[in-house]
Image (cartoon, rainbow, N blue to C red):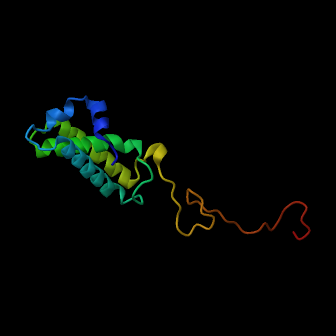
Amino acid sequence: MYATRNNISTIYGPEFLSDITPVDVPDPEGAVDQALADASAEIDGYLSKKYELPLAGQPKVLRRPCIDIAVYVLANSHTRLTNTIETRYEQATALLTKISKGIVGLGADEPSSVVAGSENGTASGADFTSRPRRFGRGRSDG
C-alpha cells in the first residue's frame, strides 16, 4: 500500500477517520485498511500503463493520492461524502492520469527504465553510435 492509517491521521488529524467511518461498522480499522488497499489498487491501475508493477519501494508522491482516494472510498460508502473529499479525489485521479501519460513523474522515486534494443543498456535508454573517423590529424590514411 502507498499509505497507512497513520499517514491519514498525521495529515487530517486523529479524529478524522472516526468522523468519516460510521459507528455501526463492525471493524473500523479493517474498513480503513480495505479502503487503503482499494486506493492502492486504483493507483496501480493508472501506473500499470507506464511502469512495471509492483514498484520498488513506495514513492512518496503517491502517498497523498492514496490517502485521498481511500478517504473518498470510505466517505462514499458510508454516505459521509463532502465536496472537499470529492475535490481531493478528483485532484488525486487527475495527478495519476498525468503520471500515466508521462506528464508528471514519480520524483526522486522514479524507476529507471531500460529501452529494449539498446546495445549498451543505459538507464535512460539513449544509445549513440557513429561510423569510424575518416579524416583527422596525424592519420596517414586520410
Residue at the far front in the pictured view: 26
Residue at 57% across / 57% down in the picture? Answer: 123
Res 52 quadrant in image: bottom left
x and y percentages locating residue 90 in the rendered image: 23, 44
x and y percentages locating residue 120 in the rendered image: 63, 64
Q: Is residue 4 above or below residue 124?
A: above
Q: Which is more toward the observer, 116 or 52? A: 52
Residue at 53% across / 61% down in the picture? Answer: 114
Q: Is residue 132 left or right of residue 44?
A: right
Res 47 quadrant in image: bottom left
Q: Which is more toward the observer, 50 or 13? A: 13
x and y percentages locating residue 77 in the rendered image: 12, 46
Res 68 quadrant in image: top left
Instruction: Give the quarter of the figure containing the C terminus.
Output: bottom right
Number of marks in picture: 0
* Residue 61 visible, this angle: yes
Q: Is residue 125 left or right of residue 87?
A: right
Q: Is residue 109 above or below residue 138?
A: above
Q: Is residue 48 left or right of residue 139?
A: left
Residue at 27% across / 32% down in the picture? Answer: 9
* Residue 90 visible, this angle: no
x and y percentages locating residue 55 in the rendered image: 42, 54
Residue at 17% across / 34% down in the picture? Answer: 18
